[in-house]
């Protein structure tokens, strides 16, 4: 096939075939015609034919039929696999019939199983003369090899539209009988075809303009862009191409028709001699400008260079691109409402951003660094190699402190109590979303930021955080419970690490490694302690494995953390189904252009917000800010604070809810303890109960066993007798299982 | 924190810069071996030790922050509800002593006087490389109401004394607050009350959800 794609190959092959066919010995009763370029060779008894300039065999066949008919033949069988030929024959049937009234044309169509005969006579009889003549134009209009087509609208829908709008038949016939007529927006034919297009897209519409229909359809259902009808200009181009193609077909009875240049019919000639259907506007008087609205509604215009790539990402959020005629003296740069709209972009604060998007961007940003930590960097970190060798690791370990101070700064920097509550709620939502996408590092960082004394001491603010949020906050904080070696978090991690990517809580990773390193000697009796090294490498491998699979930014929130223990097959199946549902819902959302636009804008806003962050890391400064937000209870009586509360909220509904909460919590407020715990935290009790009597707790838990073990000198490490290849999950679930399983004899591997 | 029938249970947290020898001190104390030939179980979140002070049974749970010095966020998780803190510095490293000062400041700010502090200069086997002035450290400790001790995990010097001193201080503090009755008693009661209140609060919160 590729061989024939090359036009010179094709030409040469056909020339060769022609010469071979010429040498055939034909029976005397048979006439054979072979085309060769523009000329026609006749072999044996046939009468000679005039030459023919048709480009394609599709139309040339008509000339041959005509020639045959003129020489007394009546029955014609055309062998083809091309629908176009059938359409051309139907279109020209009545012209041919004028030459030979007893004409009978059959088409042998298709190949293999689909091989069948069509009688053109029968088709034309059932269509009637006007529709038969109109068929080629309709075929080109509804899309063929050489013309554009309406997206999602096939022949059937087009046919139904034609049935519904019979008036257009006249137009088709007119175009068939007036080939190569140049149409304009105000041509009657164009208007008819435009109406047909409207019906094609909206059967019930009474509109006659495609542009109006686009607007109406978009407002009604806001369908995806590609499902809308073309614009009037695009339709005109399409119809011009249709007219051109239909013209070639309907003039096929002429051996040497005069065909105008395709460039007059919405085709553009490129250097490579390929005609493609694009329209290019270029005008030296226009240039692309970016107009931005800055602080204080100051409007700036900037002319952009002609060659500029990646315009989408270079556009600033508070700016718009315009094509400006710089010869014009119009001074209005922007309409008033656009100024307002763009000015708003400057005033976006954290509370206005979408929490899911913030979590997404934070996670993607952090993961990029986490992913870069190579296994060797963990080792270099343990043995304190020079910092350049472990820069990704150091960079990543700084993240949790940065994110923590980000939370504290945002909250303490907000003098308005109402807004402060909004920010706290926002951070709780972000932390929850981080948990959902298994970014445990940021989750902990944000929660410990909220737990910082400068934030926690603002009791009056916390009292007004809705219970729902407070509950989420407490639930996540509960995961940070350090008792039994962070067992709650470790259980969660061992469940979630089966679904990478996961960003682990990094301090715990480093802590586990440090304990492996400090707790064991690297050399025992002058021999290298391989046991220790093996433990470390296993731990490092488990961690790097979490970063091997990259995040899919669209699906990262689909698999929300479920509280069920290990998923069974059925659970896996059902959760798979749920995922599918969620995904398809999301896909629908993505196809909606307005929503898509909003999403992209939001993600750019979040990126801008994150890149412009200024974070205060000075504890004293933060404390002062916190004090100015909410003076200590000593300086202002707490009762005054309580009274002050109901006044600021702006929405009456919110006000009501808050009052209710103040009542429900006010009893706890009275104790002005400076503890960093939030009011009525249940954690205080939890930890103590477990810590004080570790032995009394549930011993069946693995985590329970080992903390007590360290104290007993008899406990020795050993290689697990069964390296358990069959259960890699258990083995890799956490470093703990290694030690707990080591109950056998101790062994030292050494060289 | 609580004492049950003459039995004391305390939580101790070890804080200090990396590489000052926190883990060595604890390992030395809890296992009494520093250069053991065998690998020992490790990486426990906390180590425990039982003591007998003047006939009183005392249980210590010791929380080590090794490897996590870079994560400031983690401090509060560990020192919250601690009865005692051991702040370790390296006598050959002036910076590590500054770090200790920061920790003291933070602990006093957050936990007030509820916590017994013990500042420890480790690595006294490297006396000749000393960079932190002993007298100055002693004076500083006094000014913040902390004990100051010197130790060497390597030579097993001062390790037992260190934990014993701290344990005694904690017992004294506990006894004092118990005999005063009021402050500690009220604190315990209020914290218990808090827990109860949450239970009360949830039913109150639920009907609210319903009407939204």
Image (tube, coloured by chain):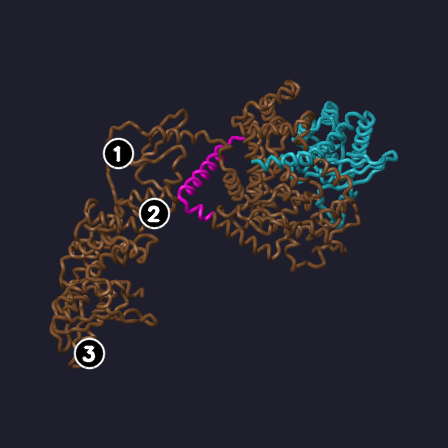
Chain colours: A brown, B cyan
Determine the residue positioned at 40% across, 28% down.
A294
Q: Can residue B61 be seen from the camera position used here? A: yes
User: Label 3 lies in what chain?
Assistant: A
User: Label 2 lies in what chain?
Assistant: A
* A80 displayed left or right of B5: left
Residue A497 highlighted magenta (yes or no): no
Determine the residue positioned at 63% across, 33% down.
A451
x, y (%) of residue A159? 29, 57
Toward the viewer: A354 or A131? A131
Which stretch did the figure color magenta? Answer: A586-615
Q: For the C terminus of chain A, which image quadrant?
A: bottom right
Q: Main secondary structure of the magenta part?
A: helix
Image disc number at residue A325: 1
The answer to which quarter of the image holds residue A413 is top right
Instruction: Determine which residue is flagged by label 2.
Output: A228
* B175 displayed left or right of A119: right
């Amino acid at each position: 096939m590729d061989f024939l794609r090359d036009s010179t190959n094709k030409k040469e092959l056909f020339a060769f075939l022609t010469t071979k066919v010429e040498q055939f010995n034909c029976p005397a009763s048979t006439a054979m015609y072979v085309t060769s370029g523009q000329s026609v060779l006749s072999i044996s008894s046939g009468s000679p034919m005039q030459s023919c300039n048709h480009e394609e065999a599709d139309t040339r066949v008509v000339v041959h039929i005509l020639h045959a008919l003129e020489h007394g033949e009546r029955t014609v069988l055309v062998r083809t696999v091309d629908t176009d030929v059938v359409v051309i024959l139907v279109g020209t049937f009545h012209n041919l019939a004028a030459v030979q009234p007893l004409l009978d044309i059959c088409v042998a169509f298709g190949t293999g199983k689909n091989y069948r005969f069509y009688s053109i006579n029968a088709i034309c009889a059932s269509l009637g003369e006007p529709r038969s003549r109109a068929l080629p134009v309709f075929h080109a209009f509804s899309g063929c090899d050489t013309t554009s087509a309406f997206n999602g609208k096939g022949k059937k829908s087009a046919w139904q539209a034609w049935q519904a709008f019979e008036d257009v038949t006249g137009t088709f016939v007119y175009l068939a009988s007036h080939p190569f007529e140049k149409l304009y927006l105000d041509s009657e034919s164009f208007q008819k075809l435009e109406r047909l297009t409207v019906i094609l897209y909206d059967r019930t519409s009474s509109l006659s303009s495609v542009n109006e229909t686009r607007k109406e359809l978009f407002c009604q259902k806001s369908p995806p862009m590609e499902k809308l009808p073309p614009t009037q200009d695009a339709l005109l181009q399409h119809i011009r191409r249709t007219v051109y193609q239909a013209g070639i077909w309907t003039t096929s009875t002429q051996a040497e028709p005069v065909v105008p240049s395709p460039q007059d019919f919405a085709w553009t000639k490129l250097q490579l001699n390929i005609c493609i259907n694009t329209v290019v506007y270029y005008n030296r008087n226009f240039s692309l400008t970016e107009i931005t609205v800055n602080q204080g509604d100051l409007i700036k215009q900037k002319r952009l260079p002609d060659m500029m790539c990646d315009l989408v990402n270079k556009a600033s959020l508070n700016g718009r691109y315009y094509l400006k005629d710089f010869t014009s003296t119009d001074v209005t740069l922007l309409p008033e409402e656009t100024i307002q709209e763009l000015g708003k972009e400057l005033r976006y604060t954290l509370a206005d951003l979408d929490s899911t998007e913030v979590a997404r961007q934070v996670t993607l940003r952090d993961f990029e660094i986490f992913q870069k930590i190579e296994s060797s960097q963990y080792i270099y970190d343990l043995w304190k190699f020079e910092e350049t060798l472990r820069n990704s690791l150091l960079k990543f370990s700084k993240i949790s402190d940065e994110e923590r101070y980000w939370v504290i700064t945002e909250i303490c920097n907000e003098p308005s109590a109402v807004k402060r509550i909004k920010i706290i709620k926002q951070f709780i939502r972000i932390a929850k979303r981080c948990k959902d996408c298994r970014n445990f590092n940021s989750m902990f960082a944000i929660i410990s930021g909220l737990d910082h004394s400068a934030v926690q001491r603002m009791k009056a603010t916390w009292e007004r955080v809705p219970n729902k949020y407070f509950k989420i906050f407490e639930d996540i904080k509960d995961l940070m419970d350090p008792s039994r070696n962070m067992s709650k978090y470790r259980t969660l991690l061992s469940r979630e690490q089966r679904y990478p990517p996961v960003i682990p809580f990094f301090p715990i990773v480093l802590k586990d490694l440090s304990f492996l390193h400090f707790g064991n000697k690297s050399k025992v009796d002058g021999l290298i302690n391989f046991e220790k090294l093996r433990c470390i490498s296993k731990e490092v491998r488990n961690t790097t494995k979490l970063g091997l699979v990259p995040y899919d930014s669209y699906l990262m929130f689909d698999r929300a953390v479920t509280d069920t223990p290990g998923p069974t097959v059925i659970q896996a199946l059902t959760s798979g189904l749920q995922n599918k549902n969620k995904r398809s819902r999301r896909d629908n959302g993505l196809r909606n252009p307005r929503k898509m636009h909003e999403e992209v804008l939001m993600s750019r806003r979040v990126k801008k917000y994150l890149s412009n962050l200024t974070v205060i890391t000075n504890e004293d400064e933060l404390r002062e800010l916190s004090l100015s937000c909410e003076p200590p209870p000593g300086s202002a009586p707490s009762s005054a604070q309580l009274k002050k509360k109901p006044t600021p909220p702006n929405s009456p509904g919110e006000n009501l809810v808050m009052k209710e909460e103040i009542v429900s919590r006010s009893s706890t407020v009275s104790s002005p303890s400076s503890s960093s715990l939030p009011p009525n935290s249940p954690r205080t009790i939890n930890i103590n109960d477990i810590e004080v009597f570790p032995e009394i707790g549930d011993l069946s838990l693995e985590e329970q066993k080992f903390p007590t073990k360290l104290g007993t000198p008899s406990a020795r490490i050993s290689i697990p007798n069964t390296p358990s290849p069959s259960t890699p999950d258990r083995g890799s679930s956490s470093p703990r299982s290694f030690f707990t399983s080591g109950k056998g004899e101790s062994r030292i591997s050494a060289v | 924190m609580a004492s049950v029938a003459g039995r004391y249970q305390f939580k101790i947290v070890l804080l200090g810069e990396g590489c000052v020898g926190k883990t060595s001190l604890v390992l030395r104390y809890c296992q009494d071996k520093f250069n053991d030939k065998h690998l020992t179980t490790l990486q426990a979140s906390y180590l425990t030790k039982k003591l007998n002070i003047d006939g009183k049974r005392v249980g210590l749970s010791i929380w080590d922050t090794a490897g996590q010095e870079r994560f400031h966020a983690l401090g509060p998780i560990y020192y919250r509800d601690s009865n005692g803190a051991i702040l370790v510095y390296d006598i050959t490293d002036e910076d590590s002593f500054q770090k200790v000062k920061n920790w003291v400041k933070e602990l006093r700010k957050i936990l007030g006087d509820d916590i017994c502090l013990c500042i420890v200069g480790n690595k006294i086997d490297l006396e000749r490389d000393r960079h932190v002035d002993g007298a100055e450290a002693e004076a500083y400790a006094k000014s913040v109401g902390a004990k100051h001790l010197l130790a060497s995990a390597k030579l097993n010097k001062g390790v037992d004394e260190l934990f014993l001193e701290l344990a005694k201080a904690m017992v004294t503090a506990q006894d004092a607050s118990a005999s005063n009755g009021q402050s500690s008693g009220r604190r315990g009661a209020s914290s218990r009350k808090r827990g109860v209140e949450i239970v009360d609060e949830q039913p109150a919160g639920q009907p609210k959800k319903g009407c939204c």
